[in-house]
Image (tube, coloured by chain):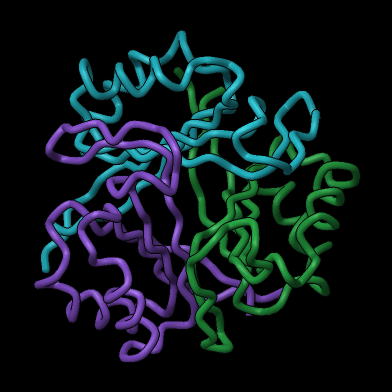
Chain colours: A green, B cyan, C purple
Amino acid sequence: MNYETVTIVRIYLTEGEGQVDNLIKRLHDWEKVRGVTVFRGIQGFGEDGVMHPAGMIDLSINLPVVIEFYDSPDKVESILEHLDDQIKPGHIVRWSAEVNV
Amino acid sequence: MNYETVTIVRIYLTEGEGQVDNLIKRLHDWEKVRGVTVFRGIQGFGEDGVMHPAGMIDLSINLPVVIEFYDSPDKVESILEHLDDQIKPGHIVRWSAEVNV
Amino acid sequence: MNYETVTIVRIYLTEGEGQVDNLIKRLHDWEKVRGVTVFRGIQGFGEDGVMHPAGMIDLSINLPVVIEFYDSPDKVESILEHLDDQIKPGHIVRWSAEVNV
């Protein structure tokens, strides 16, 4: 099995912000990223320090949502530049990894 | 607290593929990996570009599933060689991390 | 977009251990970590090798739970020293990443 370098990105949002659908659509339609997975947290807090308590998943609009994707380092770099004005500081993390090819 | 190096692996599947249970059983029974966690995404798309829409979690069979584990670099290397013929290219990512010991 | 180095931490617990709420409270009230996200796995096994089967999410108390956060390397180092006596070996992983600032 051979591997090549990718950059993994995780973007931390909350459902209530209404950004999630637009961002996924953008990554899908425009950026043509290889794949995206969206995870919903069951609890969390952000820079405002407000706890988003656990509870009935489908009743809460303030639960954390993480959008994860990976692609070649160059492509990720370009995607993140496009997202510059859309995602608040401190909410995008990225690191280097390897993917099977 | 002391730390040692591990390799973290994430394998991206969809529930409908029917691979998840077999893979977990294999990692548990054969590979004796230290621990495995399986996450279900709420939405996503893969290399086919087809969106797997959000909705009632238990009604969808096409939701993304991520199988995550970590172990010593040598052991992970050997496990990934065994999985070579089972996981499509682009669906396994791995990176180096540290674990408390 | 500028980036700075952070350490990402993932702590692997199970719901039945009853540690999750205390740990989040501690990270929030005492450690003042920037943000925390808690994820629930749908299946998994740990060092005891016992499978925690998939099923009705809200009926199981043995599902895996992951507490994830990131902050500056120094702050994470200090937080992890405080957690030294609370988290079992093999259950904290950390790695270096970059966050948008």
Across and down, in percent, residue C85 comes to 9, 72
Residue A44 coordinates in the image, percent (x, y): 49, 71
Residue B45, relative to residue B80: is it above or below?
A: below
Image quarter (top left, top right, bottom left or bottom right) of the C terminus of chain C: bottom right
Q: Residue at x 39, y 84 (%)?
A: C28
Q: Closer to the camera, A25 or A53?
A: A53
- Front in this rendered view, residue B28 or C15: C15
**Residue for point 73% across, 70% down:** A16
Judged from this view, the residue extending furthest toward the top is B85
State left or right for residue C70 relative to residue B77. right
Q: Is residue A78 left or right of residue B8?
A: right
Left/right placement of residue B24 relative to residue A38 reads: left
**Which residue is found at the position 76% from the left and 72% from the top?**
A17
Nearest to the observer: residue B50 or residue C98: B50
Residue B76 drawn above or below residue B89: below
Instruction: Residue lying at the far right in this picture: please name it.
Output: A30
Residue A52 against residue A92 in the figure, above or below: below
Quadrant of the image containing the N terminus of chain C: bottom right
| Nearer the observer, C8 or C86 | C86
How far across and how far down the image is residue B95, in percent? 40, 44
User: Number of labelled discs?
Assistant: 0
Please report the residue visible at 53 percent of the width from the left and 59 percent of the height from the top: A41
Residue C27 sits in which quadrant?
bottom left
